[in-house]
Image (tube, grey):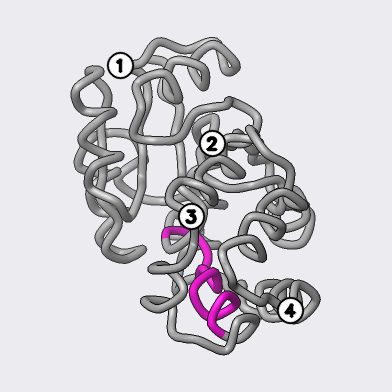
Amino acid sequence: MTVIIVFDLMETLLTDPYLDAHEKATGMSFADFERLRPAGLYHAMERGEVPESAYWAGLREAGVDCDTALFHQVRRDGYRWLDGMRDLATECAAVRRTVIGSNYPDWIEEVGREFLHDLDIEIFASYRFGVRKPSEAFFRQLCDRVGAAPHELVLIDDKAENTAAVTRLGGLGITFVSADDTRRRLRRAGVLPAVSPQEGRS
């Protein structure tokens, strides 16, 4: 049976410094920032419809002064593996084709080089697809790229609307809670062996 394990990246594998970076760079709470930011502007950048320069220009036009250098410093300093997730991603990649399926701008490329360079995990992101999860089109494009059918996808994602979208397509959606919970659910579904290779050698 072909199974493609798809991990979301932010708040599933890694911490997401997105809110903190915006707050530090603008000097305002994220709630206040969101009230001023033009609706849909960030998602347009995530879909690759506008370049990053247009994002910052749109904020300036809306009256938001943003220190972009500080934003990127806080963003880059804020990524961390969530507890147990590097081990789980490694375990998954050892037995199944494992990829990233993420809503993110092209910043994801540097994140991948920093955190995934030694793992056999390919990145597929919304900025390349021109569409974001939970759109069915995102998952169909991902399937086209990996040569799989939608029912062969297993998505681990912290957002329930994304895992529900994969479930509607006939795949398996696992809403992320923790590494241990995810591993148990993958084993129960037969996606991972009952005993990992590491445990088998202990």
The residues bearing labels 4 and 2 have C-alpha atoms spaced at a distance of 36 Å
Label 1 – label 3 distance at C-alpha: 37 Å
Label 4: how many Cα within 10 Å (few below 14, some 14–19, many 20+): some
The numbered mark at residue 67 is 4
Residue bearing the label numbered 2: 98
In the rendered image, residue 195, in percent from the top left (x then y), is placed at: 35, 50
Residue at which label 1 appears: 151
The numbered mark, 4 or 2, whose residue comes first in the sequence reads: 4
Which segment did they paint magenta?
Answer: 12-23
The numbered mark, 1 or 3, whose residue comes first in the sequence reads 3
Which secondary structure, mark 1?
helix
The answer to whether the residue labelled 1 contacts the one labelled 3, judged by CB atoms less than 8 Å apart, is no
At 56% from the left edge and 63% from the top edge, which residue is drawn? Answer: 62
The residue type indicated by label 4 comes to Asp
Looking at the image, which is closer to me, 199 or 44?
44
Percent x, y of residue 44:
55, 40
**Do the CB atoms of the residues marked 1 and 2 lie less than 8 Å apart?**
no
